[in-house]
Image (cartoon, rainbow, N blue to C red):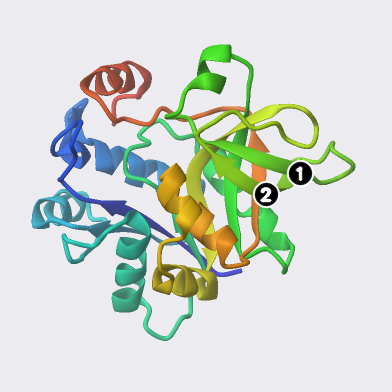
């Protein structure tokens, strides 16, 4: 595999305006995410920006940034737009889509998203974490995976059969939350962004159901730590307590 990490980011956010530029210890949040992606050593890292201010924040720390159409409908579309600019010949055959609101992500967890792609039948890889808290299991903001684990139910990876905001039991009887980081084969990403929305996708408001409806295979690595996703001012304050100050 020849992977690249792309971090889609735009300033428009209903719950936390200008979220990518939110200050964490003197640096924008998106810069913290970029640093952790570099530490993962998966491949080159680029930020796909919907706004010139984000480009400026990344270039200031000598990072690689691409300006994309601010009106693109999703992060996946923004990632694909950046790849068309950066790599029109398709030299990078795997594209990791890392959301720009995970400033506490463990680089090792990011590396693990690639594991399912060792199987050539897998089109898209992602991450799952086992849930135990009943409140999290019932929380519609925590998407769940109907996961069929490999290795007779004991493997570290599994096939994703469905995603829902409702509780779903996996083949081993556990409940798994979906962590929305993806590693797309390049051909799968190109096909995915060209697809119309699926009916179940619109009902559940989960775009990964579009891929399943089109017959794509999604597998997940089961991880044991879940990075904080920053969506609200309270999340931002928590991220500031969990994030190490840059040197």
In the drawing, does residue 196 fall left or right of residue 8?
Answer: right
Q: Is mark 2 in CB contact (under 8 Å) with mark 1?
A: yes
As helix, strand or loop, the secondary structure at mark 2 comes to strand
Q: Mark 2 = which residue? A: 161
Can the viewer see residue 42 in this picture?
A: no
- In the picture, residue 151 is in which quadrant? top right
Q: Is residue 180 above or below residue 22?
A: below
- Residue at x-position 25% and y-position 25%: 232
Q: Determine whether, in the image, residue 158 is placed left or right of residue 168.
A: right
Q: Is residue 129 left or right of residue 69?
A: right
Classed neighbour count for the residue bearing mark 1: other residues with Cα under 10 Å, few (<14), some (14–19), many (≥20): many
**Who is closer to the viewer here, 119 or 244?**
119
Quadrant location, the C terminus: top left
State the residue at coordinates (72%, 61%): 118
Residue at the bottom extreme, as displayed: 89
Label 1: which residue? 148
Give the spatial CA distance, label 2 vs label 1. 7 Å
């Amino acid at each position: 595999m020849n992977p690249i990490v792309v971090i889609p980011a735009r300033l428009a956010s209903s719950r936390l305006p200008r979220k990518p530029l939110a200050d964490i210890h003197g640096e924008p949040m998106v810069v913290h995410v970029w640093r952790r992606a570099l530490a993962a050593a998966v491949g080159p890292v680029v930020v796909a920006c919907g706004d010139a201010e984000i480009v400026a924040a990344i270039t200031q720390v000598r990072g690689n940034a691409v300006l994309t159409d601010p009106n693109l409908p999703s992060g996946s579309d923004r990632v694909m737009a950046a790849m068309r600019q950066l790599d029109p010949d398709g030299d990078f055959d795997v594209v990791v889509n890392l959301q720009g609101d995970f400033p506490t992500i463990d680089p090792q967890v990011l590396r693990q998203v690639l594991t399912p792609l060792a199987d050539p039948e897998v089109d898209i890889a992602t991450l799952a974490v086992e849930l135990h808290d009943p409140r999290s299991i019932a929380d519609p903001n925590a998407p769940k995976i109907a996961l069929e684990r490999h290795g007779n139910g004991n493997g570290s990876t599994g096939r994703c059969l469905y995603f829902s905001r409702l509780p779903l039991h996996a083949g081993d009887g556990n409940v798994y939350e979906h962590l929305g980081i993806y590693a797309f084969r390049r051909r799968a990403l190109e096909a995915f962004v060209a697809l119309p929305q699926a009916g179940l996708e619109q009902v559940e408001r989960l775009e990964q159901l579009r891929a399943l409806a089109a017959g794509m295979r999604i597998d997940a690595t089961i991880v044991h730590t879940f990075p904080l996703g920053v969506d609200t001012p309270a999340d931002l304050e928590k991220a500031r307590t969990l994030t190490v100050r840059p040197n």
